[in-house]
Amino acid sequence: MIVLGLMITALGLATLGSIDLNLFTSQLVFIGLGAAFFWLVYRIPLAAHRQLVWVYFVLASIFLTLPLIFGQVTRGAVRWIELVGVTAQPSEIIKPVLILVFAAAAGKKIFYYLGLMILPAFLIFNQPDLGSTLVVIAVGLAILIASNLPLKSLLLSVLAALILSPLIWFNLKPYQQTRIETFLNPFADPKGAGYQVLQSIIAVGSGGVSGRGLGRGSQSQLAFIPERHSDFIFATIAESFGLVGALVLLVLYFLFLRRLLAIAKSQEDDFSRLVAVGVFSLFAFQFTVNVGMNLGLLPVTGINLPLVSAGGSSYLASAASLALVYRISQKSRKTTLEIK
């Protein structure tokens, strides 16, 4: 798992270096911090996390309200806060915390669980951050389903989702609604709402089989691709390394996700299993949506590619999430050895 994660990270780092040396340097620092964060989270027993889970939830909820009060406005959104000179994105950092919360609450009443899921999703949605909202909901539902949910409770959850769907649509910002509508026909406004998707598709196609080479892609190097270092980094990789490079990334991610799922399936303890399921669904959902978004198969929602896209908050959240699973896998391995 760790080796695959580092290989994926290395591919992303090389791509960022071809875009901008400053991006490479800053991401290298974030990777170093991520390694330290990984070690710190790994050292804490999972039982200790479980005992503190409600403290985590309160702190996470407070943390999510800070952007709404003190946040920096960027492109009409207030997702970022500055702490002692460091800019952080709470909606990214709290993801591993919510996985622990959802895993601990999965055995409780369905409406209690849904309330715990909706509160952070609501706070994130109002920043506004549709992408992270969808991630929280997807992870929450994945853990709920994996908790052997009774059919009645599952039907109630589906009914609640159907009822809330129109409310979510009408509360989206105009630009968010436009993004979803543009997905159906990006060619309707190629220089406006459809620009991002079309440029991404052009970049992927122009890479051909073997790619144009690092630092030689016209779409990425001339900044035709918006957010070429984050949301649309897959298109940058496809243009630079071609179909071969894109397939390498897809295979690495497939093996990475398969390993996470295997760890989840091997757990006898429900809490450990659900935490592993949560981490698997976190990476699987973001990976699927990001790649689909880059290929024009899914609407643009602002979801980045974990371990690959630039960003400290995202990398720290990924490192912490993987540390939880690694701790679980080592505990399971130790138990197996003791039995033998």
Image: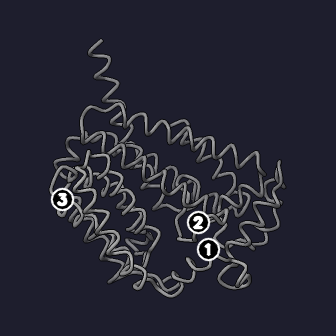
Is residue 83 depicted above or below 112 in this figure?
A: below
Three-letter residue code for mark 1: Phe
Q: Quadrant of residue 6?
A: top right
* Residue 285 point in image, percent of width and height: 48, 55
Residue at (34% x, 36% y) in the render? 327
How far is the residue under mark 2 from the one under mark 3?
A: 36 Å
Q: Position of residue 286 (x, y in %)?
A: 50, 57
| Residue at 77% in and 64% down | 203
Query: Left or right of 276: which side holds 51?
Result: left
Q: How dense is the environment of label 3, judged by Cα within 10 Å: few (below 14), some, or many (20 and up)?
A: few
Disc assigned to residue 298: 2
Q: Earlier in the sequence, mark 3 or mark 1?
A: 3
The answer to whether 320 appears left or right of 180 in the picture is left
Question: In the image, 220: left or right of 133?
Answer: right
Given residues 288 and 95, the one toward you in this image is: 288
Where residue 183 is drawn, which disc sits there? 1
User: Which SS class for mark 2?
Assistant: loop
Residue 180 pos. (x, y %): 55, 76
Q: Are dots 2 and 1 in contact, CB under 8 Å?
A: yes
Q: Residues within 10 Å of mark 2 (few under 14, many from 20)?
A: some
The disc at residue 99 is none
Nearest to viewer (mark 3 / mark 1): 1
Q: Is residue 300 above or below residue 70?
A: above
First of labels 2, 3 by sequence position: 3
Q: Which residue is mark 3?
A: 55
